[in-house]
Image (spheres, helix red, strand yellow):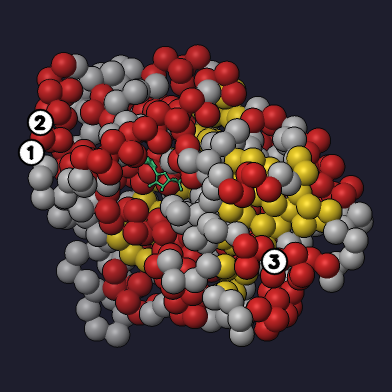
Amino acid sequence: MSSFNNQNNGLNNTNNRYRNNRYNDNYERRGGNGNGDRDNRTRFRNFRRNDDRNQKSQQENEEKFNYARAAKELMDRDDIMCTEEVISNACDKFENMGGEDGLKEDLLLGIVALGYLEPSRIQSYAIPQIVKRRDILAQSQSGTGKTGAFLISALEIIDPDLNAPQVIILSPTSELATQTLVVGKSLAIRMEDVKFSYTVGGTDAVKNIRELGGVHQGKADEKAAQIIIATPGRLIHIMNEYPHLFQHIKLLVVDECDELLTGSFKDEIKKILEGLSNNVQICLFSATLNNDVVVLANVILNNPVQILIKKEKMTLDGIRQTYVEVQHQDDKLKLLIEMLQTIQVPQFIVYVNTKKNAETLKLFLEKDYSVLTINSGMSKYDRADIIRKFKQGGYKCLISTDLLSRGIDIQQLSLVINYDLPRSNNIECYIHRIGRTGRYGKSGLSINLVTKYEKDTQNIISLTFKCPIQPLDQDLIKDL
Ligand code: AMP
């Protein structure tokens, strides 16, 4: 943490005063609290009616709308800790966000095309603040629409006519970066001038450089990507060699910020901050934030708005959390096989703590059952292939390490099994793992397989996040 405390590291200096003025100027110019007028609303309704080309079937949209309502109720106002400023600027409609002109029209069309009829709670709180160009530390439970919150904001603030990268969105894994890219491209489907660059390790670096407007082995691309979706390593690599490509960056989004700001990524994030202008706006997002991250965020961010969740509300009520106690570690395999034979849900994820456990389980199961495994020991291409196969629905069970515990959105997933409970020094993982189910207001079930030695860790999890974990009642599986 101390390395971020350095007064020279960028964001903590006199330029911040300039930034504050700029925010205020922008805010006033854009028309105060961001509430739009009746014209905007009418315009949006017309978009909805006219946008036949991309519109989903009415039934599908109604379903999404109901989930949106349910998600809002789950993330109740009383669960959130934020200032009055955030609440009074919150927008319940996409068409009213983005200052006096509302959001860009072609962006609104993309939002509708994706079936987002109303903003989720985090979207209604965070987007107006980001668009007002405030730094933000935002926490919201898994599956409640964080990705949409920062992507819609990014698409709103970029200048499509400026031929230079303007926004960086950082993810800890290439899997999450891929998902962000897919959602970003869907939201921007009507924004013909908007380009994304997927700047992650294991992909073609020369292509990345060209996409960002750099000249390497020939020409730069005619049009530079305005939005860079990146993992830290590849981004730093390009920043070191082509620092000038980043001079127009005005927004840095750090997704899963608790993971990226601490541990092995910490120094990389520091380097990235050093490579950007002091005036860059920074937005930090995660479902889990501990005190260290909040303290660190306050050092990095400039006069930030905070949207935090009370600790006892970090897991959503829609996810039933249960456990089955076993005598020995070996009994877990028998139990899992029984589950594979009897559980009727189309798909579930089984989490283990190590690559070795993932591979061993797969060896035992793959002959008789449709299982896949994924872990960081596999190549990026193989990993992408596994996720694609699982999302297509052909496999019932995915055995995964924590590589896939954060952010990954698999709509049809209603069950998560913790074959190994997360280690006691990494209990946040539990929140992320179970958050793969119960997405956007849907219900879900998590089952921990625990030996008596793991009961203590389970108790710590239950006490820390104030979430009851009950013995499994078989009827819950039938209800899935
Ligand atoms: P996220 O938390 O960003 O991973 O989003 C979780 C799920 O919610 C994804 O499947 C999104 O497609 C969906 N979602 C996000 N925002 C909305 C919205 N405003 N309306 C309907 N669905 C949404």
Of mark 2 and mark 3, the one earlier in the sequence is 2
User: Which x, y percent locates residue 229?
Assistant: 40, 59
Q: Amino acid at mark 1?
A: Asn
Q: Is residue 49 visible?
A: yes
Residue at mark 3: 338
**In terms of secondary structure, where does tag 1 sit?**
helix
Crowd rating for badge 1 (residues with CA inside 10 Å; few <14, some 14–19, many 20+): few
**In terms of secondary structure, where does tag 2 sit?**
helix
Of mark 1 and mark 3, the one earlier in the sequence is 1
| Ligand 1 found in image quarter | top left
Who is closer to the viewer here, 198 or 75?
Answer: 75
Q: Is residue 34 above or below residue 331?
A: above
User: Which x, y percent locates residue 265?
Assistant: 63, 60
Residue at mark 2: 46
In the picture, measured across the screen, residue 118 lies left or right of residue 466, that is left
In the picture as drawn, the residue positioned furthest to the left comes out as 50
Q: Is residue 417 above or below residue 299?
A: below
| Alpha carbon separation for disc pair 1 and 2 | 6 Å
Crowd rating for badge 3 (residues with CA inside 10 Å; few <14, some 14–19, many 20+): few
| Alpha carbon separation for disc pair 1 and 3 | 51 Å
Residue at mark 1: 50
Q: Amino acid at mark 3?
A: Glu
Q: Amino acid at mark 2?
A: Asn
